[in-house]
Image (cartoon, rainbow, N blue to C red):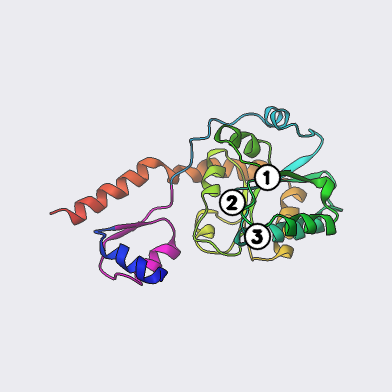
Amino acid sequence: SDKQLTHFFMNGLDASIAQSNSVLKDVDLFSKTIPRRLCPHPIFDNFGEPVSRDQALRYLGLDHNYRYMLFFGFIREYKGLDILLQAFAQLHQKHPQLKLIVAGEFYVDRKSYLNLIESLQLTEVIELRTDFIRDEDVRYYFCASDLVVQPYKHATQSGVTQICYHFNKPMLVTHVGGLADIVPDGIVGYVTPVSADAVANAISDFYDHNRMETFSVNVQSEKLKYSWRNMVNHIFDLCEEIVP
């Protein structure tokens, strides 16, 4: 079983670094004595430097007259794209200038999502970019977007958040796993319950009150704690603790 394999793996470790509070608590399920540190994953800065919104829209062939939100990454059931589509259906009439970019490959049957888009009458306002996304193209999707939405149904953490920090992008996450630990609510974005209504209300607040500039500035300050140097320091601290 998964638990037996994890026990086997944990028994071979001298120390552990957990990247969210929820995972740090999970370490206790397997060892009460192993030295451990909490250190969120550093920023993913390997996708190049930011580009302007105009440059990103031109590169992606998107209409400059719309504003864009982004759902990014492999499409799996737990990532809640269906929740976001239901939320977006609530927003469409109030915010006709808004479109959603879905960028990432389907790792589930795409038919149910395409049927949902059609039944919610969203075909014209969803940009499906569901082929393989090359590393060199990632920055254009983030820089074209105002807000990155991660409406996950369950998770421990998400690498997408650390890409958002690199590109200074506000984000919306749901209150699952360790996502809320690294997205201060109302400062760099939103932490919402796992529901279409809650996601829709937060997105509406973002555009109704023009939060983008304030949140983006706050992201630049908040991301300083997610440096690679910080991770290295935690590793050195653990080494000093476990090596005689």
Of badges 3 and 2, nearer the viewer stands: 3
User: Which amino acid is tagged 2?
Assistant: Ile
Check contact, mark 3 vs mark 2: CB within 8 A: no
User: Which amino acid is tagged 3?
Assistant: Gly
Check contact, mark 3 vs mark 1: CB within 8 A: no
x then y, percent, for residue 5: 36, 66
Look at the picture and state if 62 lies above or below 39. Answer: above
Q: Is residue 28 magenta?
A: yes
How many numbered dots are placed on residues in this image? 3
Do we see residue 120 in this rendering? Answer: no
Do we see residue 198 in this rendering? Answer: yes
Q: Tell me if mark 2 has few (under 14), some (14-19) or many (20+) residues whose alpha carbon lies within 10 angstroms of its own.
A: some
Mark 2 or mark 1: name the one nearer the start of the chain: 1
Left-right relation of 190 to 20: right
Look at the picture and state if 193 lies above or below 101. Answer: below
Q: Is residue 73 magenta?
A: no
Observer-nearest of 54 and 215: 54
In the picture, the disc for residue 130 is 1
In the picture, the disc for residue 80 is 3
Asked which quadrant contains residue 103, the reply is top right
In the picture, the disc for residue 229 is none
Task: Say which residue appears at 12% left-offset and 54% top-offset.
Answer: 244
Asked which quadrant contains residue 23, the reply is bottom left
Task: Say which residue appears at 63% left-offset and 46% top-offset.
Answer: 104
Q: Tell me if mark 3 has few (under 14), some (14-19) or many (20+) residues whose alpha carbon lies within 10 angstroms of its own.
A: many
Question: Where does the magenta region start and end?
Answer: 16-41
